[in-house]
Image: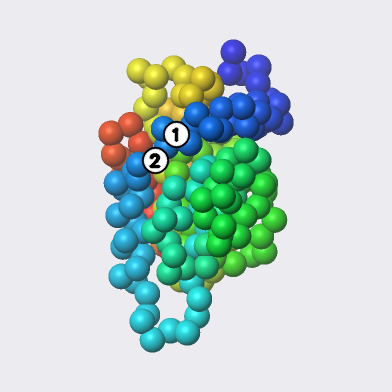
Amino acid sequence: MVENITQSNYISDVQTYYNQVGNKYSRFRKYFWSEARKFIDWTKTQLDPNSEKKIKFLDLGCGNGLYFQITTEYESYGLDFSEKLIQISTKRYPYVNYSVSNALNTPYPNSMFDIILTVGLFQHLTDEQQIQLVNEVVRLLDSGGIAFISGMIDVSIIPQINGLITYSNTLKHDLILNFLSELESNNIIKIIEVRNVKHSIIYLIKKL
């Protein structure tokens, strides 16, 4: 049962799973999610063409690195705690800077990134971990940086995702919105958009 799975051993189970099925997973994960693609395209319209700064992009939970195909303008970073998926991504996109690490406690310094994308991590996390993930994204964003944070919220028709128990449901994501609203009231971030798309939710935020 879900309530008997601790934070530490649940993360280990997910990591082990993706290491075991990495090749199969990568064969199926070959199409962009349209919402993530639109976000990346939109970020390019927000850039100053006269700026000499190299934009730093992080795919947090990058898996097989699918989105690095369309972030070549950026200095791209990919983090995932599946060694197998990072190996696959490295072969495909060797120009990306990789880290095999936990998305809840990354090795990067504060305010390092201008753009952060994280897709599909929520459903593998408990309430506490979901807030921790959002907090880590905010920590990593530089002033003026933008982040796309998404995950499934209604999985009532899918009791398991990729063979893994999911914690996600609509009420739990109210906690995330409350947390983001508190950060906004403290002038740490601005919530640009919160939107439901089928079974998923998208939080688009900007670091102040």
Taking the spot 56% from the left edge, 43% from the top edge, the residue there is: 88
Q: Is residue 67 left or right of residue 108?
A: left
Is the C-beta separation of discs 2 and 1 under 8 Å?
yes
Q: Amino acid at mark 2?
A: Lys
Report whether 160 appears left or right of 194: right
**Neighbour tally class for label 2: few under 14, some 14-19, many 20 plus, Cα within 10 Å:** few
Instruction: State left or right for residue 2 relative to residue 117.
Output: right
Q: For the residue marked with disc 1, what is the amino acid?
A: Arg
Where 191 falls versus 100 (above or below)?
below
For mark 2, what is the residue?
30
Mark 1 neighbour class, 10 Å CA radius: few under 14, some 14 to 19, many 20 or more: few
Q: Residue furthest front?
A: 91
User: Could you tell me if residue 133 is visible in this image?
Assistant: no
Determine whether the residue tagged by mark 1 lies in a helix, strand or loop. Answer: helix
37 lies above or below 153: below
- What number of labels is visible? 2
Residue 151 x %, y %: 43, 38
Q: Position of residue 13 (x, y in %)?
A: 65, 26
The Cα atoms of the two marked residues, 2 and 1, are separated by: 6 Å
Q: Is residue 154 above or below residue 207?
A: above
From what the image shows, is residue 65 above or below residue 123? below
Comparing 92 with 35, the one in front is 92
Give x and y (percent) for residue 136: 59, 52
Say what secondary structure mark 2 lies in. loop
Residue sitting nearer the eye, 193 or 20: 20
Q: Residue at x 48, y 24 (%)?
A: 162
Q: Position of residue 81 (x, y in %)?
A: 64, 41
At 36% from the left and 65% from the top, the residue drawn is 43
Picture quarter containing residue 29? top left
Q: Which residue is mark 1?
A: 27
